[in-house]
Amino acid sequence: MISPSHNPSVSIKNRMSLWLKFSLLPILIYSFTLPLAAQQYDILIKGGHLMDPKNNIDEPMDIAIKGEQVALVQKNISSELAVQVIDASGLHVCPGLVDIHTHNFYGLDPYGQYSNGYNSLHPDGFTFPYGVTTVVDTGGSGWRNFRQFKEQVIDRVRTRVLAMLNIVGHGMKGSPYEQNLNDMDPKMTAMVARQYADHIVGIKVAHYSGHQWEQIDRLVEAGKMANIPVMVDFGGANPPLSLETLFMEKLRPGDIYTHIFGGGGFGREAIVDLGGNLRPFVKTAQERGIVYDVGHGGSSFAFKHAIPAMEQGLKPNTISTDSHMSSIMSGMKNMNNVMSKFLNMGMNLNEVVTASTWTPAQVINRPELGHLSVGAEADIAILNVLEGNFGFTEKTGEGKMMGKHKIENELTIKAGKVVWDLNGLTAPLWDE
């Protein structure tokens, strides 16, 4: 009698069973992994109107993200290729905004002002909600305390924080520091700028009230030594120093004049005369290569200057906020609000986006920023352009302009990660 273990029919059945298991295993594994393998991208933004000035894109287009980078930009990318799909229908998709005039060297020095003081802002709460992914702190730190700024702020926040070093060694600490010519050291400033070239993109002077040009000469000398642009916040001299001399004789092409629509009173000449006429050298200077930056701030923007100047054909090169504790509570408010003003004053949306992304990236010599080329870091803002009746102010309690359009940021992506989602574009309904 043959035992069951030696029954030929049982052995054949076992062998067939094993054969089926091992033959079907690769098929089963393939069938389960197929959907995962097909999902080539982490995030897909579909249905939005893409605005990428560097690449001359201003039309409906999808954009896919893999890891921290832009992976694909084209029409109608299949939703099945992405783990997460964001529906941007009716919205505008653009590079993360680049704000080149902010104050972010916040700290606890009661006398520090914008240099480790109370006047400056922790950036993340005032950047990501408005689509800003890169800021430039302008002049908060000087060569004496930049390292503290880097360790205290730059290294600890999620926003990309760059800096324009103050020509004053102590930074923007107010008087008497900013009036001290002896602390305006071009050699030390340039040395620190070169030492931290990954973070320092320019050199700034601000609030100087003397009538000589020594502060500008030292500023430009430091800029030449470090091979970076300079930014001028044109002091408080009374009567004001000549804008024409500054633009046509002192600054180099590529240097930046901020608060372009400020002035007109104590300490600073406006770009328009008392009759609202654009001064004849202003356009010539811009054509020469002087960069006009908005730098709105709390009291450095006036409709009586901006509207006549723009009606006469002058547009800013770069839109920036000059954000600090006072300006966010006044007429400036935030980057979207400043962009909205210019949208209502005659710039079209593409011009506004360009002045808030690709142009400022070029001005600070960071061509890796401000665009959505394949391979670029995936910094993205999704904007909603609202229609209605909106009021825009200069300073609290002062002049108001009405407008039909207002820009509101819906969603911000920094390095491929969603960091702000105003209305839950990335979230499912709670009961589904």
Image (tube, rainbow, N blue to C red):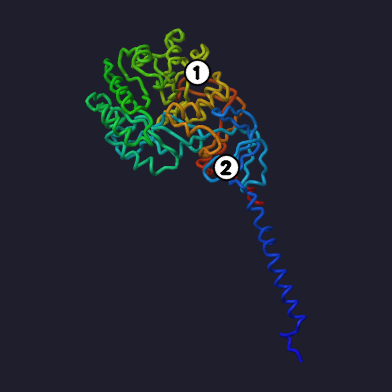
For mark 2, does the 10 Å Cα neighbourhood hold few (<14), some (14 to 19), or many (20 or more) residues? many
* Residue bearing mark 2: 65
Q: The residue under label 1 is which amino acid type?
A: Lys
Relative vertical location of residue 63 with respect to residue 216 in this rendering, above or below: below
In which image quadrant can residue 389 be found? top right
- Tag nearer the camera, 2 or 1: 2
Whole-percent x, y for residue 332 in the image: 46, 27
Judging depth in this view, the residue of 262 and 183 nearest the camera is 183
Amino acid on which disc 2 is placed: Ile
The N terminus appears in which quarter of the rendering? Answer: bottom right
* SS state under label 1: loop
Which residue in the structure is indicated by mark 1? 315
Instruction: Please state which of residues 188 and 331 is positioned toward the viewer in this rendering.
Output: 188
Q: As rendered, which of 294 and 351 lies closer to the eye?
A: 351
Toward which corner of the image does residue 418 lie, by quadrant? Answer: top right
Nearest the viewer among 294 and 64 is 64
Residue closest to the far bottom? 1
Q: CA distance from mark 2 to mark 1?
A: 34 Å
